[in-house]
Image (spheres, rainbow, N blue to C red):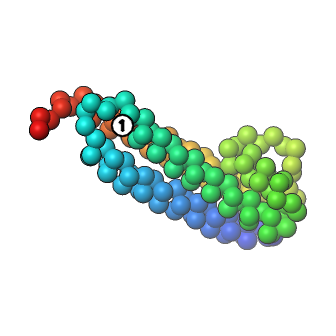
Amino acid sequence: MTLIQQLLLGSLYLGICLAIEAGLLVFCIHLLRKRLGGQQRTRQFLQTTVVMAIAIGLIVFAHTIQVWIWATALFFSGAIVDWNTAIYFSLVTYTTLGYGDVVLGEGMRIFAAFGAVTGLFAFGISTAFLVAALREVFLLEERPARKA
């Protein structure tokens, strides 16, 4: 794969992954707002647990999808010939661990590096989202309970 192809395809996959991340976080916001709006104060611990479980579960799901997208791209491009190694390499690259035990040829290195960039962006966005979600939960807990 040429340099320009690696840059273009890497950018395309990065865009797809970040669109998935954004879409699932917007869906998560919708679910959290719906869940938070219908709870009573007497169930705060359970409410907080459910809200955070939903948020974390959807974030983990979003990251998993993105790792699979990169693994699929690497497998079908022929850069990695078996699924186990493709998923392993994709996960190690996405999380920026980069063990170095699997190394791609020169024709795919830049493309694969976009997987790491995707992971950096996605983890940053996810962290910001969880901080904002926790803030909302804590603000709800501080509000006085409404009397029916």
In the rendered image, residue 96, in percent from the top left (x then y), is placed at: 70, 43
Q: Residue at x 26, y 46 (%)?
A: 37
Numbered disc 1: secondary structure: helix
The residue singled out by tag 1 in the image is: 47
* Left-right relation of 28 to 64: left
**Between 39 and 18, which is closer to the camera in this rendering?**
39
Q: Is residue 22 at all visible to an observer of this figure? A: no
* Left-right relation of 70 to 86: left
Q: Is residue 78 above or below residue 124?
A: below
Question: In which quadrant is the N terminus drawn?
Answer: bottom right
Q: Residue at x 57, y 47 (%)?
A: 60
In the rendered image, residue 46, in percent from the top left (x then y), is placed at: 38, 33
* Left-right relation of 130 to 44: right
Total number of numbered discs in the rendering: 1
Q: Is residue 101 above or below residue 11?
A: above
Q: Residue at x 86, y 60 (%)?
A: 82
In the rendered image, residue 40, in percent from the top left (x then y), is placed at: 25, 37
Q: Residues within 10 Å of mark 1 (few under 14, many from 20)?
A: some
Question: In which quadrant is the C terminus drawn?
Answer: top left
Q: Residue at x 84, y 43 (%)?
A: 100
Quarter of the image holding residue 133?
top left
Q: Amino acid at mark 1?
A: Gln
In the rendered image, residue 16, in percent from the top left (x then y), is placed at: 58, 65
* Left-right relation of 44 to 103: left
Q: Is residue 34 at all visible to an observer of this figure? A: yes
